[in-house]
Image: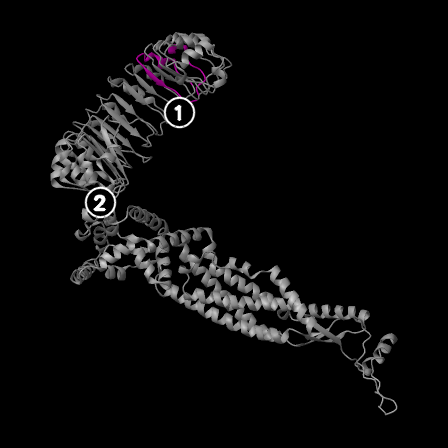
Amino acid sequence: MLCVKINEFTSHLSLLRNMIPVTEFRQFSEQQPAFRVLKPWWDVFTDYLSVAMLMIGVFGCTLQVMQDKIICLPKRIQPSQNHSSVSNVSQAVASTTPLPPPKPSPSNPVTVEMKGLKTDLDLQQYSFINQMCYERALHWYAKYFPYLVLIHTLVFMLCSNFWFKFPGSSSKIEHFISILGKCFDSPWTTRALSEVSGEDSEEKDNRKNNMSRSNTTQSGPEGSLVNSQSLKSIPEKFVVDKSTAGALDKKEGEQAKALFEKVKKFRLHVEEGDILYAMYVRQTVLKVIKFLIIIAYNSALVSKVQFTVDCNVDIQDMTGYKNFSCNHTMAHLFSKLSFCYLCFVSIYGLTCLYTLYWLFYRSLKEYSFEYVRQETGIDDIPDVKNDFAFMLHMIDQYDPLYSKRFAVFLSEVSENKLKQLNLNNEWTPDKLRQKLQTNAHNRLELPLIMLSGLPDTVFEITELQSLKLEIIKNVMIPATIAQLDNLQELSLHQCSVKIHSAALSFLKENLKVLSVKFDDMRELPPWMYGLRNLEELYLVGSLSHDISRNVTLESLRDLKSLKILSIKSNVSKIPQAVVDVSSHLQKMCIHNDGTKLVMLNNLKKMTNLTELELVHCDLERIPHAVFSLLSLQELDLKENNLKSIEEIVSFQHLRKLTVLKLWHNSITYIPEHIKKLTSLERLSFSHNKIEVLPSHLFLCNKIRYLDLSYNDIRFIPPEIGVLQSLQYFSITCNKVESLPDELYFCKKLKTLKIGKNSLSVLSPKIGNLLFLSYLDVKGNHFEILPPELGDCRALKRAGLVVEDALFETLPSDVREQMKTE
């Protein structure tokens, strides 16, 4: 019998192991071993407690599956209680009265046999009674205790590792651990720390004294500003000798450089929020609440697990009995397991309470590298906050060495030193010459983007005319720039630049064009206001709304040679500093990025202005101040909110106005007063809501360029034939159904764009356009192209925008003519 039970136990245990492998529970814990660096000792300890509680639950469930849950026997009914029983029941009860055993004698030996109370119940009735009593008499806690243990434990394990699984937090953790491991193993980390540790003790003492004095100074209200400025400074002891530049392997240097960039981007990304900290606090609070609930109800119900259970069920008509005495076979073991489980849960809960104490005892959203700065001597390691700080606090619980080695990649001093190691040998003059190109001003330009600094070899390229520096910090322009005799243009895009006094003297005499793109006004180089021969100034960045009070920009009046000024920013009014240079300013461009531009009366003072661009300034009307600019030749009001342009009649006083661009607005119609602008040569109404073209428009007979694309025009007046000087005409993306024959009287036409309309026939008269070199007819309802296109000798296949199938409708000789260059 014992062997049978052992075999049953083994088979059930094997079945349970196949149904629920232990390895399946690993998904509730961390998936990557590298995550262990973010698990402090209390998380590791509670993980082991969870495994112990999980084994209790699995063991209890195994016993539930393996063994009988309850065994019941009917109670004997006393004779006084059987008077009201039916006869068959009385006989059944009487039959259970035991007979006195026969006395043994030598002549009549007694045969040993099993004896007891007879119930006349078969096996199925016993099974039925056991099930009924298990369901109705046994307390629910005694029945479901192992399952509750299993569920609670799985919830504990899920809560402990949920922040490793949640998409919003797991991505940050994986990225952080990846960067942390690379920083820890980087040869540059070892080199930087070893070099600092090898310094003289006297230098270290001096540095510590300087740090203590600076901390005392920074304790005032301006301490943060002083600290931010010190981060940008590069101590002289970190200036790299060219003789040691090759000491670091090139591949290792590039890897370290990439790590610096990754750390910067990761820091900017992670310091924006505190999702990791919030999730860790919430899951810890949830575990504490669950611990209190478990302790409360388990303490109250553990006494319900009893070995003997009285069962009273009304099944007398099926079994002959209604009162039973049952034995809960697992009661003794479950009672012991429940007390053991409560002990584990209590230890688990106390550990979680300690975790909460650690979380709220001090601010974990701020992390100071003060001890690292004192130990390594790298003074500019910044403190971090939010999730970045929280992860570093967690790392310190595992091993503080990780934070120390990681801090190397937060230091600008360390980064600048690495830059110098790589920069001195990376950019040779030949390599720089390969990057030379011609810019929009037809100057030979050298663009340098996202470099670690400014290579000295740049100043060996004497033919250089334009130097473009983009996203380069801590640029120092040395006196050797005087070797670039042909340098006339300098572009600084998001660069912090310092300049040598001798270099400034050179730029004052030679620089003609300066372009500055910035994120903060403090990035504007103060030396640019002394460039007395500067002719063009381009400023791109966020300026204050009250720019007129800015003392720095008021010094624009010293730029006596300035002719072109472009400001792409968010100004609300034209600064007074611009008015101060209006006497010699010829072109002004304001790109306002949607900020409403008001108070434009200052425009009246710019009497010599010939070109004016007011782009994306949220203008609802054409500014009246514009009508006072008698020297104005070009006006561009792109991307505003113009709906009505009745004021256009006032343009008749601007005798020199030849270019008018009112594109990308909400203009619904063109007033008849347009006919008075007889000096117009270029007119753009594209991307508006115009439906009707007035015939008076074509009285401006000097127009050479007319763009009406992207409107709702359905009809082209025949008066268009008056425009004998027309060279460019576009009605792309309108609703035109036919073209007037008078259009082909414009024999100087070179570009004709009629694509994306509702045209079905292209007139053979198009052959009259002998100078036509570009024709767009794609997106219409043409079935055939006229062979007269062959008369347009200047039109080649590259200049004909048409569907391939429609092109094949042309005669073969015409197609061959267009394909030949």
Q: Toward which corner of the image does residue 71 lie, by quadrant?
A: bottom right
Q: Which mark is residue 474?
A: 2
Note whether residue 723 is visible: yes
Q: Is residue 739 above or below residue 329?
A: above
> Which quarter of the rendering shows the N terminus?
bottom right
Label 1, on which residue? Answer: 688
Note whether residue 574 is visible: no
> Which quarter of the rendering shows the C terminus?
top left
Report the side of 761 relative to 768 (left or right). right
Magenta stretch contains residue 711: yes
Magenta stretch contains residue 41: no
Q: Is residue 386 above or below residue 806?
A: below
- The image shows residue 412 at horizontal and vertical percentages of 25, 50
Task: Please tell me which residue lies in front, 752 or 186.
Answer: 186
Q: Amino acid at mark 2?
A: Asn
- The image shows residue 629 at horizontal and vertical percentages of 22, 23
Q: Secondary structure at mark 2?
A: loop
Mark 2 or mark 1, which has the lower sequence index? 2
Q: Toward which corner of the image does residue 587 lie, by quadrant?
A: top left
Task: Please tell me which residue lies in front, 735 or 618.
Answer: 735
Mark 2 → mark 1, Cα distance in angstroms: 46 Å
Magenta residues? 692-720
Q: Can you tell which of label 2 and label 1 is closer to the viewer?
A: 2
Task: Please tell me which residue lies in front, 87 or 624.
Answer: 87
Q: Secondary structure at mark 1?
A: loop
Give me the residue at 27% from left, 62% from top: 371
Report the side of 82 relative to 303 (left or right). right
Task: Please tell me which residue lies in front, 140 or 634.
Answer: 140
Q: Is residue 351 above or below residue 791?
A: below
